[in-house]
Every structure is written in structure tokens, then in C-alpha cells.
Image (tube, rainbow, N blue to C red):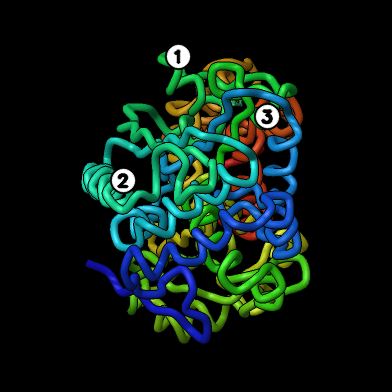
Amino acid sequence: TYNVESFEYKILTEEFSSIDEYYASFKATLKRDSAEVLEEIKLSNVRGRGGAGFPMGLKLGFCRSVESETKFIICNADEGDPGAYSDRYLMEQRPHSVLCGMLIAGYVTHANHGVVYIRAEYPDSATIIEREIELLRAAGLIGKDIDGSGFDFDFKVIRAQGSYICGEETALINSIEGQRPEVRVRPPYPAEQGLFNKPTIVNNVETLASLHYIIEQGGAAWKAIGTDRSSGTKLVCLDSFFNKPGIYEVEMGTPMSTVINEMGGGFKLPVKAMQIGGPLGGLVPVSKINDLNLDFESFAENGFLMGHASVICIPESMPMIDFLEHLFDFAAYESCGKCFPCRLGTKRGHELLRKANTSDYKISKKLFEDLLSTLEEGSLCAHGGGIPLPVKNAMEYFEEEMKGYFE
Ligand code: SF4
């Protein structure tokens, strides 16, 4: 069990009423022109919650404009970032927000197939989602000609057996196809050629969950919440180093000091930094808390990444070299192996840090910087390309602690 709280806005955490009440706005949507509904989503400026922050309306628009008899909506529920459990919360406690979001995405893109790709570590999520899909079927809200609209849609639930990289949309698609989960070269993007080479939308659980509010209250209502470029609310996961760990629904643009000290109740133990947004997210020293707001721009301007907004604390007692060694070990283990900068670079990074951590060996700064820029510029996807960010943050903000390991 964990705390779930909202402040000011209760949208994603809103209690579920009943299928009849909840889906009334979806039924009304089916009577509207789907192009109009897409404009509403574009107006809201809702951006992907999985980490990349890509505008959802644009993505849906790309997929809609591709002619194809078969299209797919994939819900990416392979929530693999350590410390992130907001997707799990939505699937288990608010499953209809996710299912309704997929139906809406299907309606605006003319897709008739929904795939919910749920990580194997979340067996309850899969069971709950399957159970609720059957309730929708009984209510006539999925299947052929939903509510006499001519729109067909049905779901398939996949219990993923994949690894961390299956959260990357093209590796996820390969995994569904039964292939080795390797990242695909883009273009073509999934919106044009995705699952079985058909136009495909891959969206994170939380992104899809935001659509119900947008169609019910209008895109302008969502846009009015948060900041100009980061609209709406965001779920933030705080770990057990907080006095009040849990999931908080936070308006975008809220100062991080409010999230950490007021919502989370501050730290239980002395903490020196937080890794926010998963292993590829930045490493935020506690001295930067007052400079940050919870939105895409504030994090980027300060040299961090909001990502999926999970917060993992690094205690004072943990040497930074141990953290970085573990980070590279994780990155090497989870690399899909498709491109050599990441396949070799993450391994070499781990070896260098391990050697420096366990012997008198000093790492060449030049070599290490070369390694980071090769990873950043040469990697095919955000896995290899993203690992240098927290490493660079650590080198900058914990220079005193790290300099003894370098020549
Ligand atoms: S960066 Fe890593 S995970 Fe991404 S394609 Fe290359 S090897 Fe695979």
C-alpha cells in the first residue's frame, strides 16, 4: 500500500463512478466528427508522460493521416523505471481511464485494435485490465459498431516477458511480434509503420489516461492547468526515503520544493541527490531543489530530465562512485545490443568505474569524456544516449567526491 494524494486538481486520481457515468462522454464523442476530437486533443497540448514529452495530438494526427485498413493503439505499460509505479496504480485502481483513453485514441486515428502491453511483474494489473475489458464488452462499449457509431474496437492484453528495453516503443513492437526485442531504426516511425508494419500509436498509460478529462471538459480546460508548454497534471512517485512516500497528482509547474517538502513531507534520512525520471533521468543534487519546477522545460533548462517523474533518493551514505558503477552495470545489462556505442560503451564504462572503485587505478578524464560523447551522439536510442546525463550531473555536482578516481 502507498499514499495516493492530489493537490488542487484531482483528474487522474479521480474516483471511478460507474461504467455508465464514466463512458457517457465517450458515447458523446462517438457522435462527434473524429477530426474535431483530434483538434480538441491538440488544443490541450497534452504531451507524452512516458518520458519523451512528445505532443500526443501530433502523433495521433500522423497516424490518422496514413491510409490503412489496419491500425493499432498500443498502451505501453512496461513500466520499468526503478521507483515508478504510477502506471501500475492507474491500471489497478483506475483501469477505465486507460481503456477509455485507448478507445478515444482509436476513434481519432481510425484504429480498431488495442494492445495493452503489461510487464510480467504486474500480474494483478493484467488480471484487472482483462476483467474490466469484459465488463466493457458486456456494456456494449467494445466490439463491432459501438453504440451504433460504426466504430469497431477491441482489446488484446499481452503479459510481457521482456526486459527494460521493451519500454522503448520499437523494441516493444518487436516483442509483440515475437521477435528479439531490439530497437528499430527510425524512420519509419511507428505512426506510419509499426506493429506488423501497420500504422501504430504507442502511448504510455498515463498519457492515455488523460484523454477522458480532455474529451469531457475540453482541450482548453486541460491546457489551462499547468504551464504554457507543459499542460495538465502529472503523477509523481516518491520513494521510501520520503516521510510520506506515494503517488501525488501534481499540477505541472509546481515548485519541486513543494512536491518534496510539503507533499512528500521531506526526507526521512539525509539525502544528497535524487535521480528523477528513471535511470536515464538526471541526477538532481538537493542544492538544486529550489531551482526546479515540475515541468518539462524547467528540468531541461537546468540540465535534467523530468522523464516519467519517479523520484529515487540517493542517501548521504552512498558513495557516488557506487551509484555510477551500478548505473553503468544496469545500462550494460539492459542494452539491447543493436548498436555498438551502447553495447560496448556501457560495458566499458562499467569496467572503468569498477576498476577505479576497487583498486588504485585512475580513469583518464579524456577517455571517459570520449566514452560519454560516443554514447550520447552515436547511440541509436535513448538508452545509450541517455545514460551520460546522470553521469555528467554526478561529475559536475559531486566533483569533490569523484575527482579522486580520475587522473
Ligand atoms: S542505444 Fe542501446 S538499447 Fe538503444 S539501440 Fe543501441 S544498443 Fe540497443
**Above or below — where is 208 with respect to 177?**
below
Disc assigned to residue 320:
none
> Where residue 384 appears, x then y in whole percent?
61, 31
The earlier-in-sequence mark between 3 and 2 is: 2
Mark 3 vs 2: CB contact within 8 A:
no
| Residue 325 visible (yes or no) | no
Q: Secondary structure at mark 3?
A: helix
Q: Which residue is mark 2?
A: 137
Nearer the camera: disc 3 or disc 2: 2
Q: Is mark 3 within 8 Å of ligand 1?
A: yes
Q: Is residue 94 left or right of residue 173?
A: left
Outermost residue toward the front? 148
Q: Is residue 128 left or right of residue 357?
A: left
Q: How many marks?
A: 3
At 59% from the left and 62% from the top, the residue drawn is 284
Would you name the residue on which mark 3 appears? 375
- Hey, what amino acid is under mark 3? Leu
The residue at which mark 1 appears reads as: 180
Residue type, numbered disc 1: Arg
Q: Position of residue 56 (x, y in %)?
A: 67, 50
Q: Are marks 2 and 1 in contact (CB under 8 Å)?
A: no
Q: Earlier in the sequence, mark 3 or mark 1?
A: 1
Please name the amino acid that badge 2 sits on: Arg
Residue 248 found in image quarter: bottom left
